[in-house]
């Protein structure tokens, strides 16, 4: 994701990243109007100042400031792959977007996070994969519940979008198809 960084010298401020390239959302390439905030290692989540606007805050900030943030109409939460997804269970009604960071394309923990958010927790809002995601992953990311994708800056969203329709039939059950293929097709090869 292309980023414009703004680092403030004020204590309690976050590192803000806003996209300058479009994202893929609901199988279309659209402009991204959300800003992702990143907590610096030396910052305490309860001390940061969250600016107005469409803001995605780290889970640690949400948990420390949820009483204030849940009243905002446009707030999202950023999950790292080592965050506990169940910490959001009681708060998903207040969150417009949940973004899951993929620091490396080889890190598969984000798939599990998405599946748990959709299947176990019942999250219905936008679920966004951000970071180092590749074309070959989009079909599978979509299967576990992601409906928006913000790739790294060096990846073209339009080229990646075609990965959403790589396959016409799925074998395994997942968020998007609850029954495996052997339950959907009878022995004569006709659809059940």
Image (cartoon, rainbow, N blue to C red):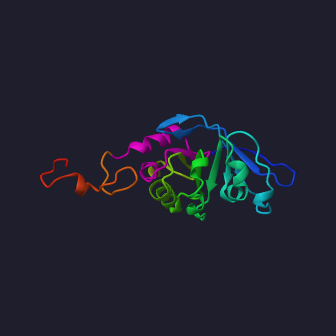
Front in this rendered view, residue 30 or 53: 53
Q: Where is residue 31 in the image (x, y as percent from the top left)?
A: 60, 34
Residue at 44% of width from left, 56% of height from top?
A: 119
Stretch in magenta: 138-167
Q: In which quarter of the image is the N terminus?
A: top right
Residue at 73% of width from left, 55% of height from top?
A: 65
Q: How many marks?
A: 0
Front in this rendered view, residue 135 or 108: 108
Tell whether position 59 is magenta: no
Q: Given the current orientation, which residue lies at the most extreme right position?
A: 10
Q: Where is residue 152 in the image (x, y as percent from the top left)?
A: 60, 48
- Is 98 located above or below residue 19 in the figure? below
Q: Where is residue 28 in the image (x, y as percent from the top left)?
A: 49, 35
Tell whether position 159 is magenta: yes
Using residue 140 as the reference point, say whether residue 170 is left or right of it: left
The answer to whether residue 130 shows anywhere in this view is no
Residue at 42% of width from left, 44% of height from top?
A: 164
Residue at 14% of width from left, 55% of height from top?
A: 187
Q: Position of residue 33 (x, y in %)?
A: 64, 37
* Residue 23 position by quadrant: top right
- Is 152 located above or below residue 180 in the figure? above
The answer to whether residue 163 shows anywhere in this view is yes
């Amino acid at each position: 994701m292309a980023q414009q960084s703004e680092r403030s010298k004020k204590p309690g401020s976050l590192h803000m990243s806003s996209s300058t390239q479009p994202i893929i959302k609901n199988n279309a390439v659209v402009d991204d109007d959300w800003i992702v905030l990143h907590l610096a290692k030396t910052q305490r989540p309860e001390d940061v100042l969250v600016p107005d606007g469409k803001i995605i805050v780290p889970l640690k900030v949400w948990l420390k400031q949820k009483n204030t943030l849940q009243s905002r109409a446009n707030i999202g939460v950023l999950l790292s792959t080592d965050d506990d997804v169940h910490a959001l269970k009681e708060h998903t009604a207040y969150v417009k977007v949940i973004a899951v960071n993929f620091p490396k394309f080889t890190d598969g923990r984000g798939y599990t996070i998405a599946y748990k958010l959709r299947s176990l927790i019942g999250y219905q809002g936008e679920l966004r994969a951000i970071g180092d995601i590749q074309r070959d992953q989009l079909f599978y990311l979509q299967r576990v519940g992601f409906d928006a994708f913000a790739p790294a800056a060096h990846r073209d969203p339009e080229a990646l979008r075609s990965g959403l329709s790589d396959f016409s039939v799925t074998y395994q059950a997942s968020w998007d198809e609850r029954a495996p293929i052997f339950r959907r097709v009878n022995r004569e090869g006709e659809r059940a």
